[in-house]
Image (cartoon, helix red, strand yellow):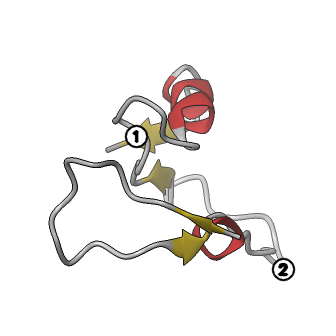
Amino acid sequence: MGHRPPKDSPPRARPHPLTSLIQSITLQNTPSPTLGRTFISGGTRPGSPFLTLTEQLRNNPHWHVW
């Protein structure tokens, strides 16, 4: 089932399966501390499925949220 874009989205926005937007990766070794962790948020609009994740990472000192 696809996640529908908010009504005020650009006309070119199309629904995508939610799982395609939240797929994770597995790192083979301990990441370098200088590498850092960055999350580019898609969850700033009311009703976005990313609001909770965005706030969790924003409150985590190991993550930088854009």
- Residue corresponding to mark 2: 28
Report whether 54 appears left or right of 20.
left
Report whether 27 appears left or right of 52.
right
User: Does dot 2 land on a helix, a strand or a loop?
Assistant: loop
Q: Which residue is drawn at 62% across and 62% down?
A: 32
Q: Earlier in the sequence, mark 1 or mark 2?
A: 2
User: Does dot 1 land on a helix, a strand or a loop?
Assistant: strand
Query: Disc 1 residue type?
Result: Val
Query: Disc 2 residue type?
Result: Gln
For the N terminus, give its image quadrant.
bottom right
Could you say where residue 54 lies in the image, as x and y percent from the top left?
Answer: 52, 35
How many angstroms separate mark 1 from mark 2 (CA)? Answer: 23 Å
Could you say where residue 12 lies in the image, as x and y percent from the top left?
Answer: 20, 78
* Circle on res. 65: 1
Q: Quadrant of residue 53?
A: top right
The front one of 2 and 64 is: 2
Q: In this view, does 40 lie above or below 57?
A: below
The front one of 4 and 60 is: 4
Q: In this view, does 1 lie above or below 34?
A: below
